[in-house]
Every structure is written in structure tokens, then in C-alpha cells.
Image: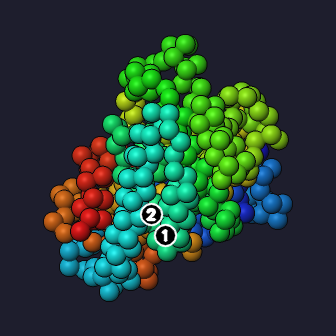
Amino acid sequence: MKIKVFSEDLTVGMYISELDHPWIESPFLFQGFQLKEQEEIKQVQSTCKYVYVDTEKTPHQINNKLKVIAAATQKPVQKKKRKPTKIDFTDTVTLKKANFDKSSFTERLINARKSRDKTRSYIDDMLAEAKMGKITDTHKAKELVAELASNIVENLDASMWLTQLKSRDEYTAIHSLNVCVLSLTFGRSLGLKGDELNELGLGALLHDIGKMQVPLEILNKPGKLTTEEFEIMKSHPQKGYEMLLSDSTLSSEVLSIVKSHHERLSGKGYPDNLSESNISYYTKIVSITDVYDAITSDRVYHDGMTPHEALKRLYEWMPDNFDTQLMQSFIRTIGIYPVGSVVELKTGHIGLVVKLTDTHRLKPVVMLIMNRNKEHYPRRKLVNLASSIWDKRDDKPEIKRIVDAKEFNIDVKKIINEESLT
């Protein structure tokens, strides 16, 4: 049974099954979820006038309150009166008041950029050698992965932000780097450490090396592949595995990632149609990060999705393709407002999410890009949406929605380059 409940009457424990508007237009990743904390209730209240609560999925003790709500006379829908927005970040927010040190963030960003660029240079050489059929220097790869893993521990958000440095024309190289960074970040959140992270990261870095044995006219074809072309494309995991098989320093786990990252739980993946029980744990991790980066990237044949939309799609595809627990963990790792997302605040300002916090998942640190009139700031500044400075204000700078950068003609890559290069 579903009961209509006005947002102000929501309590922790209620299971929301429907919103008062389409899910796709909301910031929520799951179509149906249980309220577990006040932060989530506030998010629902900021986006919905009312919702529908499923009594069968709501704890029994809370259903008593739902019965009272159902029996009561329905309240007329009234628009809340809002005070005019008065926030002007130009003169009311300072780095000290926002409780966030931009100079420290910039320093971490520059350090992360140096490590990333060093690895990117190696990947370019590795792929060039692979194209000629040469065995890559995996010893150097191991050193760089260890450096990336260490850097992610120290500069997690900066490393994640840099994964937005994507190029349609350099997809394979950047994709290999991003999947490595994403896998290391995800693995760390799962509790992997030391050699475990290094193994996972190395497999992720090398996972697409076999694509260098696929003809460029197929690899970069702007249109849909023919059946024959797709079969050739599907050969890249096996080709990569065979290229690396003679390297005795690579573990079976690394080789498994390279060969099996396109296997799926349904048994309909390739090249071996493996069942769920035959796909390794690390491979299941990389299969998620691989698809996430692929669908958020601009390719020769399609434009990338926003990080938020990509997480929704992955969740929809999960039953036949990805491990449920891992997928849910990945979504928690990336967050409701993933680092790199372009967001519009309720004040009208446009910003980039640059840092997440464990205690305030819905209130990240945002780099302001445009003022409320959609004019670019000459000097960007960081605003901590979770700062206590906003507690007693009616005009809090909360996130209204995630937007596509193209909607406001924002070049995210250009902004990241300007902030991370010295």
C-alpha cells in the first residue's frame, strides 16, 4: 500500500516509492529508497512537496504514524514562501569563513597532476609499443601505479577531479589512466591496501592494451560497428592477455583483469562467457569502473553522460552485469554529487563539485564558476556547503540540481587545466 505523505511529515525509516515528479529529474540515484538520516529527509524536502511511502517496506512501528497521516484530511498543496536570495559570494564568503583552504587544495591538485601526467606519458609509450607488438615495461608500470595509489591516499578528491580531463581524440590512453585511478579509489574504499591496491591498479592500467591490435578504422569508427567489426573489437581482451602472458612478473589476477573485464554476471560477456562465480573479485571491480568512465567520456560516436546520470544507468544495468554489493559500494564511493559534477545552487550560482565529505554527503565543497546572472567569475573560489556559517541563514547555498556543462557552455577540462597547471 502506498500513502501520500507531505515532505514536512517524513521521518527516518519511511520507504519512498514515488516522488511528485519523475525520478530522472531528481538527484536521487535509486528509484525507491529508505530514509536513513535527517540529511536525506532535508534533500527530499528541498526537491519534493510530497512523496508516496510504501507501507510494506516501512518498519511496522512507523506505519502507525502513516495510518494517522492517511486518516487525516489531505492538506492543500501550498508553496512555501521564500525570502529573496541575498547571498553574494563576492563579499560575504571568504576562505576563512567558508572553512576551506583553496591554497591547500591547489597544492594537492598540482601534486596529483604531476603524478597523473607522469603516468600518462608512460601509457602513451606503452600503447605505441603495443601497437608494434612489443612487450611493455611492466616494471615501470608497477612503480607508477604504486605512486598513483599513494597519491590517492593523500590527494583523493584532487585525483578524482583530474579524471574529468578527457579528450575525444585520445580516448584509449586517457581511459586507461582514468580506470586505474577510479579502480584505486574504489579499491581503497573497499578496504584494499598495499599490494592488493597495486595489483588492482596494474590490471586496470593494462586492461585495454589489446585494443592496440584492433585496426584504427574500427577502433575510431564514428558510426555503429557491423557484426564482423564488433567481433574484431571483442577480440581485444584476448589479444591483450596473449601480449602479456609471457611476462612472468605479472600475477594471474592482473592477467584475469585484462582478459575478463568484459565478462558479465549473466554469462553473456566476452571472450569466454564466464559465469558469475568464475569472474574474479578484482575483475568485477574493474568492469564497473571501466563502464563508468566509458559512458561519461566523449567518444567518436557519442557524447558522454554526466557522472550522476551514468550512476543511474549503471544501477539499471546491474542485475545482469555487475555485482550488486560492489555496485552499491561504488555508488557510495562516487557520491550523490560526484566530484567533477557541474551543479546549480538554489541561489542561481553555477559551480563544480571538487570535494566530498563523509559526514555531509549532500553538501560538498564547490568551486564557483558563475554568479547568479550566469556570468563567469574572474577569480574562482571554493565554498564549503557544509560550513556552519550557513546554519542560521534562510538563503543557504544548497544544490538545486546537477546540470550538463554544455547547458552553460562550461569547458570543464579548460577549468581543470587552469587550476592544476603552474
Q: Please give left or right for residue 296 compared with residue 251 in the image.
A: left
Q: Which amino acid does label 1 sit on?
A: Asn
Vertical side of 169 occupied by 418: above or below: below
Determine the residue positioned at 49% across, 61% down. 144
Relative depth, front residue between 47 and 83 = 47
Task: Say whether marks 2 and 1 touch (CB < 8 Å).
Answer: yes
Left of 212 or right of it: where is 384?
Answer: left
Left or right: where does residue 218 sit relative to residue 268? Answer: left
Q: Residue at x 69, y 35 (%)?
A: 263
Q: Residue at x 33, y 85 (%)?
A: 97
**Residue 39 place in picture, x, y as percent:** 57, 68
**Which residue occupies the foreground of this view, 329 or 385?**
329
**Residue carrying label 2:** 159
Q: In this view, does 110 lie to the left or right of 56?
A: left
Toward the viewer: 200 or 80?
200
**Residue of label 1:** 151
The answer to whether any part of residue 265 appears in the image is: yes
Rate crowding at label 2 as few (under 14), some (14 to 19) or many (20 or more) other CA atoms within 10 Å: many
Q: Quadrant of residue 196?
A: bottom right
Distance, label 2 to label 1, CA atoms, is 8 Å
Closer to the chain start, of discs 2 and 1, is 1
Q: In which quarter of the image is the N terminus?
A: top right
The image quarter in which residue 35 lies: bottom right
Query: How many labels sit on residues?
Result: 2
Tell me if residue 60 comes above or below residue 267 in the rendering.
Answer: below
